[in-house]
Amino acid sequence: MPLDRVLRLALVFQWLLALASVVLFRVEQSRLPDVLREYGATQGGSTSLSAELVGWYALFWLAGSLVATAGAFLLKPWSRPLFLVMAVLGIALTGLLEPSITSPGSAAAETAAQILVGVILGLVYFSPLKEHFAPARS
């Protein structure tokens, strides 16, 4: 299979797995132990300035990640550094989030999505695909 097809499939599956993580959490939420469901119900809804800033940061990250994914799918040179920056900002965002409850299926899907981010970075920086992303030489 050509590497550009592998990249495109990885990009699509990364987002499908991220979406699956959210869906699986909603489906599996009722199967969590009572103490975890109660804890989860009391979390969130914070209106502090820091919570609002983290929310805006998350929206910025989501938009940037979608743009980076679209650019990488189209093999645009500008998308490679943007994808890397969004991956790093995503890691930083994780450190800013409050403790949360998740389900096993949701955690597995999210972990798989993050592994694909690493695979994508490997493809665009270290495989022959890197030539597609190199700046044009004059």
Image: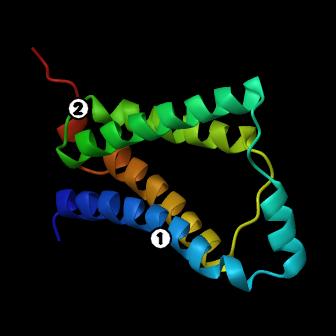
Q: Crowding at label 1, few (<14), some or many (≥20) Cα neighbours within 10 Å?
A: many
Q: Answer with the quarter of the image where residue 107 lies.
A: bottom right
Quadrant containing the C terminus in the rendered view: top left
Q: Which is more toward the observer, 11 or 56? A: 56
* Image quadrant where one finds the N terminus: bottom left
Which residue appears at 13% of the width and 19% of the height? 137
| Label 2 secondary element | loop
Residue toward you, 35 or 7: 35
Q: Name the residue tied to disc 1.
A: 20
Residue 55 place in picture, x, y as percent: 61, 35
Please identify the residue farthest to the bottom as the structure is shown.
Answer: 31
Residue 29 pos. (x, y %): 68, 76
Q: CA distance from mark 1 to mark 2?
A: 29 Å
Residue flagged by tag 2: what amino acid is it? Answer: Pro
Residue 91: image x %, image y %? 62, 42
Occupied quadrant, residue 45: top right
Q: Work out whether residue 95 or residue 83 is closer to the camera in this orientation and state it.
A: 95
Residue in the image at 58% along x and 65% along y = 111
Label located before the other in sequence (1 or 2): 1
Q: Amino acid at mark 1?
A: Ala
Q: Circle 2 sits on which residue?
A: 77
**Left of 16 or right of it: where is 115?**
right
